[in-house]
Image (cartoon, grey):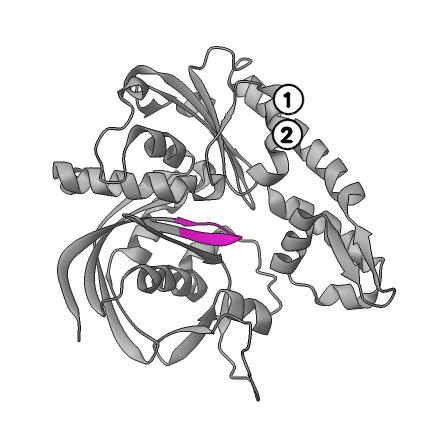
Amino acid sequence: MEISNSVLDLGVDMGRYAVKAVAGSRSITFPAYAVPYEAPLLGIGMGQSPDILIGWGGNVWTVGEGAIRQGDGNRPETAAWIETPEYLALFRRALTDLVPERWFHVNVVAGLPISDFRRDSEELRQALLQVHTFRQGGQVVNAHVANLRIVPQAWGAVLALLLNGDGSIADADLLNQRIAVVDIGGHTANLLTVKGLSDIPSESVSLNVGAWDVVRTVRQFLAGLGEGFASLNDHEVMRVCLAGRVWNGAKREWVDLHQVVQPKVEHLGRDIVEHARTFWHGGEAFDRLLLIGGGSYLWQEVVERAFPQVNVLPEPEMANARGFAAFAAYLSQEGLWEQA
């Protein structure tokens, strides 16, 4: 068995659409879906990603693309998700995707939506801060989460600009600046205000608005095209939303979805920017206004119209994970984990 005595610094963003994780120069992302594994009668596998199986306690989960192929992909919408075995299966896959060893130690920075942060931090700590023993790829893995820091989502954007990947300071100007972050994900839009590297709770909030609202609208539209479209799971519907079209096999034609997607995006976008203007008193006083999250691909234009000064971070869906990983490296470099 390969044993690593070093401690890996990991940032993980467990979104409802995708899991994103970063450790040093390595990063991974995969669909945030896991179901109990059911072996196919025949699986040729050409052109498909292999099933990633995570097992413990007598149960085996298929995680990511394999889960989407096997399951209906329609996860119940509940905050108790972090207490489910599915959540653990996703986290454990992220560990094994980034670390080749079978026994290793890891420091983790993870995030929660602003509205869930105080309520769910202890539950998430209990779920993650342990020695994770499971099977993956026919081998036993022991992953010791030695230290854990839970932070409000959207903070990753600030940390990604403030710190280099090794935890050193990249942009000292942020130490005294007033920063606003719009972080749009699958189920929430987080609005965060940071001043002097402390957040301002009265100007920070989670809105129950996200890309899954668009998915529900498009699903209703697709139902009118034929019963067969009901078999599309949530992740598949999200992909056609982003593509802006869907193939109608019965009519042998592409169906344009922009007429459905854009009005919903505009409607929800107005809600997001109106809340932001209210919380941020117009937003003109910020030194920087940042946009991150996978929802940026849908709402970037809407946010830019409202806030022309907005800066969309590169690969906005990975920004939280990058910032969390850099913060983990900083805590290790400075010996601050016990204080965390």
Residue bearing the label numbered 1: 305
Query: Is residue 209 among the parts visible in the rendering?
Result: no
Disc 1 vs disc 2: Cβ atoms closer than 8 Å? yes
Residue drawn at x 46%, y 33% as measured from the top left: 313
Any mark on residue 301, and which? 2
Residue 44: horizontal and vertical position, in percent? 55, 83
Element on which disc 1 rests: helix
Q: Is residue 175 above or below residue 300?
A: above
Residue drawn at x 44%, y 22% as measured from the top left: 202
Quadrant showing the C terminus: top left
Query: Is residue 22 among the parts visible in the rendering?
Result: yes
- The amino acid sitting under disc 1 is Arg
Quadrant showing the N terminus: bottom left
Residue 286: horizontal and vertical position, in percent? 45, 15
Answer with the quarter of the image where residue 164 lies.
Answer: top left
Q: Is residue 43 above or below residue 15?
A: below
The answer to which of 323 and 58 lies nearer the viewer is 323
How would you rate the neighbour count of disc 2 (Cα within 10 Å): few for under 14, some for 14-19, many for 20 or more? some
The answer to whether residue 132 is left or right of residue 32 is: left
Look at the image and give the residue range highlighted in magenta.
13-20
Main SS of residues in magenta = strand
- The amino acid sitting under disc 2 is Glu
